[in-house]
Image (cartoon, rainbow, N blue to C red):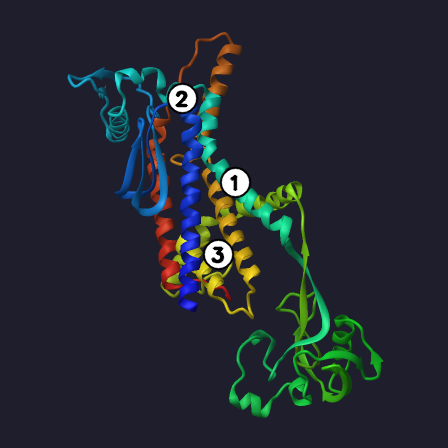
Amino acid sequence: MTALYYTLGVLIFVFAILASIGLHEFGHLIPAKKFGGKVTQWFVGFGPTVFSRRVGETEYGVKAIPLGGYVKIVGMLPPGKGEETVVDEHGETRVRQSNTGMFTQLISDARAAEWEHVKPEDTDRLFYKFRSWQKVVVMAGGPMVNIAIAFFLFWGVFATVGQVVDAKVEPVVAEVIPCIVPASEDGRACTAEELRDNPSPAAAAGLEPGDRFVSFNGTPVTDWEQVQQAIRDNGDGTATMVVERDGERVELEATTQVQPRPLDSASPEDLTPVGFLGVMPVATPVYETGGPVYTLQQMGHMTVDTVQALVHLPVKVWGVARAIVGLEERDPLGPVSVVGGGRIAGEVASADESTFAMQDKVVSLVMLVAGFNLFIGLFNFIPLLPLDGGHIAGALWEAARRRFARLRGRPDPGYVDVARLLPIAYVVGAAMLVMGMVLIVGDLVVPLHLDA
């Protein structure tokens, strides 16, 4: 059953991401058609075509490698200087090349490939002839769809379940630590020798999960802070504790031990010798709910965090590469690919009910998909080709250049030739491919897990 739930979680995540990609591409396609442009292809995935169907002038389909998607809008690249368009004997429009040199030839080849799809009747439907604001709308439509998906998913969670903003710690034992281990090794399993020779004071005293502290050394306690402070102040002394267990009061005796521990306001490296008992309290999460405005506020905070993560993404990916070859541990808060996201989704779906209730599983999966959509949307706004943000930047520069020309009484400077940035686009694309492959390999070789 666990394997079934794991597979189901992965499939739900993959389907949600593919659906998000498809909607992203519709965010480009719909306004492009609305403005009179010609869109010949809408595909989810890359590589060999698995399925396709032509509706009107547009082919819709799915390809074999589900790592993205695209729409083909005719006329993205204008003819460059020194090049002209001609109609061949088959009635197809081609670019006559007159440039030489590696980069200019590269650009000319890209233009030639672009204009192979242009028919004589498409002259007034070419994307590069759109108004600048129309280009911005078309190119921003895709990532804005992802951000809208994230908004509605986050809103659905925040308006119903809410998000955890704090934890109410109660004077109730959630876990009894069986032995004493150094603070730097908290959480590791006790050895048989440690269980025999160095049990924790709580284990030796017979404390059990579910025990509620009533008093400590004769002083009544009503919250965890009082219990915690009393334990720390007790040093190496003997303590008499009264706990409520199954509706009855039980008196227990323990001898606390002084251990170096991080205090609440200190960093984990700053240790202070204090009395130690060896219990973990029950922490009940405190949820906060909200509507659309609350959701936008929270997404604003997430956007700041995401932008900061994007700035450090190359360094983080380099850390993943080092972890793959064993030079360092993988950062549990570092980036993951869709493979890693699918793994986490599977682990959430198959987690034991004692760890995740069904509601928690659904919320976790929804938040995971929402987070990926927010990242995809913001990532695509980076003002570099081949990302959508690169085309948006070109359209904004085109609008500014034309406005300045009008204000100064000069002739229209014409369309911005984004094809001249193709060498940069190829470098950026190659870098994105390398980083994506590193993350995928990292998620296979040194994967992050739900409990990391």
In the image, residue 405 above or below residue 174: above
- Please tell me whether mark 1 or mark 3 is closer to you in this view: 1
Observer-nearest of 189 and 221: 221
Local packing at callout 3 (Cα closer than 10 Å; few below 14, some 14-19, many 20+) is: some
* Pointers 1 and 3 in contact (C-beta within 8 Å): no
Q: Which mark is residue 334?
A: 3
Which is nearer the eye, 73 or 408?
Answer: 73
Farthest left residue? 89
Q: Secondary structure at mark 1?
A: helix
How many marks the image carries: the answer is 3
Q: Is residue 196 visible from the viewing direction of this image?
A: yes
Q: Which amino acid type corresponds to the residue marked 3 in the rendered image?
A: Gly
- Pointer 2 residue: 416
Picture residue at 40% right of the left edge, 20% below the top = 36
> As shown in the figure, which amino acid type bears the numbered disc 1?
Ile
Q: Residue furthest right?
A: 219
Label located before the other in sequence (1 or 2): 1
Nearer to us in this view, 362 or 94: 362
Please state if 255 lies on the left or on the right of 50 as rendered. right
Q: Secondary structure at mark 2?
A: loop
Q: Is residue 178 left or right of residue 1?
A: right
Whether residue 381 is visible: no
Residue 440 vertical position relative to residue 63 in the rendered view, above or below: below
The residue located at (46%, 65%) in the rendering is 350
Callout 3 touching callout 2 (CB < 8 Å): no
Q: Which mark is residue 147?
A: 1
Task: Give above or below for 22 relative to 177.
Answer: above
Task: Name the foreground residue: 212 vs 54.
Answer: 54
User: Could you tell which of marks 3 and 2 lies nearer the N-terminus?
Assistant: 3
Side of 162 where 426 appears, left or right: left
Please give left or right for residue 124 compared with residue 359 in the image.
Answer: left
